[in-house]
Amino acid sequence: MADSKSSVDERLIARFNQELGSDLKNSSKCGDLVKYYRSELEDLRDKITVTDAGCIPSVKGMIDTGRSKLAELDEKEKRLDGCAEKLTDRIETYHQLMGEVGEKMAQIRVLQTVRDYMALIKDIENISQELEACINGKDDSKPIALYVALTGPNSILDRISGIEAPHLKMYARNTAFHWHDVLTAKYSTEFEALLKTIKWPNMNQSLEQFNPSKENISKLVLLAEYLFLVKLPGDQDLLSVKLTPSIICPHYTTPVELFVKPFRLRFQFHFTGNKQTNRLDRPEWYLTQVLMWAKENHIFVGQHFQSPALRAGIVNSSVRLEFVRGLVQLAIEKLIVDIEQIIQDEALFAHLIDEVLPFEQDLKTSLGYPNSYPSVVSVLVQPVFFVKWMAIEKKFTTDKMDAMLNTADPFELLDPANLDELKIPKCADQFIRLLDAIKERYCCLPQPSQQLQFLELQLELIDNFRCRLLQLYNDGVNPTKILNALNYLTSVLREWGENVHYLHLHAALYGPDADEISSVFDQKIEELNYCHQKLVEELVTWIVHEITARSRPYRYDRWPSMNRHDAKETLMVSATASEMFQATINHLHDMEQELSTNVFMVVVRMIATELDQWMISSMVANTKFSTGGAEQFHFDMTRNLFGMFSQYAKKTNLLFKRINDSCTLLTMPLGSAILLRETLLSPTGDEESWTRALQEVGLAIFDRKATLDVLDRRNDMPRIG
C-alpha cells in the first residue's frame, strides 16, 4: 500500500512539474489548476449519480440489477428462517420420541439379558439333569459329551467368560466342579479296577513279560480318553504343586495320577517312617527304585495312552514323560524332607550329591527327561544348599589335585611306549580327567548361572595347577616334564573351547551378540602359553650355554694360519669342535626323548637361532680366517652342525641363516669378494643396488654392514686405501 501511494504521489508531482514548469513565476497557475480539477471531479460525480440525468446508463443498469438481487436475497432469507423454525420443532419432537424409544429399548435389552441369563441357567440345569439321568447308564460317551458341552471348547463356560455375571459364572463353575468330581470318581474307579486286573504296577518285568490282554488295554485306553476329557475348567497352571518356593511341579492328568498312585503307595511304605530302607545315608536306594520303575513302565504308558490324550485335545504334552515326572516327584518330595538333616553332615551331603548326579544323567540319557521338568537336582541347587555344594566341590577337587602331584613320580609318562608324538605326564592326564569329571557333574544343572559357578571352579583349578607346576619347577623338577604337562593341558583346553557345552557357557557369559566367538578358556590358555614360553626360553638358554661352554678350543683354533686343504685328502671335522658338537648331539637327543614333538620342534628352532647368533657374534666377528681356515669352518658348519639338525628340518640353511651367509662370504672366490666389497663401498651406490648385489651372491639375511664385517675377516682381502 505504501508503494502504490508513493507511485501516485510521484505521478502527481510529475504532472504538476509538467504544468507549472521550472519557472517560479508560473506558480500563479496553481489556482487555475485547482479550479480545473474541481470541475473535473464534479463532472465525474454527475456521471455516476443514479438520480442525475447525466448518469452513465451502464452504471445505472448495474446498480438497479444489484438492488433487485438484494431484494430477492432478503425474501429467500425470510423463507429460510421459516423453514428453520419448522425444522427445530420437528427435531424437538424427534428427540422426545427417541427418548421414549430409548427407554423402551433399554427395557427390551434388560428383558433380553434376563432371557439369555435364564436360558444359560436353563442350559446348565438341562445338562446337569441329563448328566444325572445318564451317569449310571450303559453309554459312557454321553456323560462325557455333556461335560464337554459344559466345560470344553465353545461350551457354556466359554459363552459366559466374556460377560459381567459373577454369580452366573460361579454357578456354572460350581456345577462343572461337581460333575468333574462325580465323573472322575466314576471313571477312576473303573480305571483302577482294570489296572488291578492287568496286575499293574509292573514290577521287575520286561515289556515282553508284562503283556495284558488286548481287551483290557482297549478298555483302559477308552477310560483314559474319558479321564483326559474330564478335566477341571480354568487355567491348569493354577493346579501346580509348590513343593518349595523354587520347585513347582505342574499338575498331571488323572490317568497319569492313577498310574503313579500304586507306586506312590509302595514308595511311602518303603522309604518313610521307621522302615529299614528309609536311611539318610542310602539315598541311592530310593533313587535306584524310582529309576527302575520308570524304565520298566514308561514305554507301556507312552505306547498305549498318548493317542487317547491326542484325541482329547492334549497335543503339547507327552504322557510318557508325564508319567516319569510323576515318579521323579516322589524322589523330590522325599529329598525335600531329608535334606535339612543331611546338610548337617558333610559326608552324607557329599554322598547324596554323588548319587543324585548320575541319577539325573541316567534320567536324561535313557529316558529323555527334559531339563525344563522339575528334578531331584533342583533341590540341591536351592541357594542355601548350592553354596554348601560348591564348598564341598572346591575342597574335594583341591585335595584331589594335591594328591596327584604328591605321588612318587607324578610326571611318569602315561604311555612310555608312545614316544613319537604327545608325551602325557600322569598328573596332567589325571588333572584333565578331574576337570572333565567336574563338567560331567554340572552339565545336568538346569540353569546356566549354576553351571557358570562350576566353570569358575574349573578355571580356578587350572590356575592353581599352573602355579603348582611352576612351584615344582622352582623346586628342581626337570623343566621338560613341566613343559609336557603345560603343553598337554593347553592342547586339551583349546579343543574343549570348541565343544558345544563350553560354547553355550560362553554365550551365557558374554551374551549371544558378543563381538567375536572365542573360548571360555582363552585367558587361562594365554597364561599357560606365557609360562610355557618362559620355560622354553630358560631351557634353550641353558642348553645353548652348555654347548657354548665347550666351544673355547674351537673358537681359538688356528683359523688365521690354517693351510688350504689338499684336494686329495678328505676333509674331517675339526678336532677342537668334537666336544661342542657332542654336547649338541646329546642335548638334542635328550630333548627329543623327553619332550612332546610339537614342543621339541619349537626348542630345536630356538636352539638353532641362538647358536646362529652366537656363532657370528662370538666366533666369526672375533676371528681372522685364512683360506684354509675358511674352508674348514665352512665344512664344520654345513656338513656337521647343519647335519645334526637335518633330521628336524628339511632346509637347515634356513635355521642358520647367519652362519650360512658367513660361510658363503668366507669361501667365495677372492675376485668376487673384492668386487662385492667395492660395490657395497661405492659412493654412487644406493640401498636398492646393495640389496641386489647381496641377493646375487646368495645371501639370505646379512645387510650391507654385516657383509662388510665378515669380508674383513678374510686374510686374503686387500686393505682398503
Image (tube, rainbow, N blue to C red):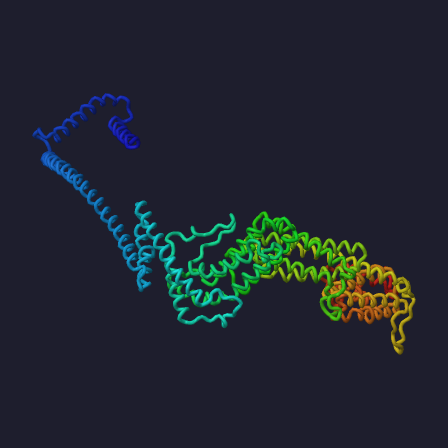
For this orientation, the residue located farthest to the bottom is 568
Q: Position of residue 461 (x, y in %)?
A: 68, 54
Give the vertical position of 261 relative to 114 (above or below): below
Seen from the viewer's position, the closer of residues 449 and 371 is 371
Confirm whether residue 57 shows in the render: no
What residue do we see at 15% from left, 26% from top? 42
Counting from the top left corner in percent of width and height, residue 429 is at 70, 62
Q: Is residue 446 left or right of residue 717?
A: left
**Viewer-proximal residue, 352 or 219?**
219
Instruction: Tell me: residue 88, above or below residue 309.
Output: above
Residue at image coords 44%, 57%: 252
Question: Residue 446 lies in what quarter of the image?
Answer: bottom right
Report the side of 419 relative to 112 (left or right). Answer: right
In-front residue for pair 248/139: 139
Image quadrant holding the C terminus, namely bottom right
**Residue 538 lies in quadrant:** bottom right
Q: In the rendering, at what x and y percent does residue 532 appear? A: 73, 58
Q: Residue 457 appears at what percent x and percent y?
A: 65, 53
- Nearest the viewer among 434 and 413 is 434
**Point 60% across, 59% down: residue:** 284
Q: How many marks?
A: 0
Quadrant in which the N terminus appears: top left
Regarding residue 413, the answer to whether it shows in the image is yes
Left or right placement of residue 433 versus residue 710 in this view? left
Quarter assignment of residue 32: top left
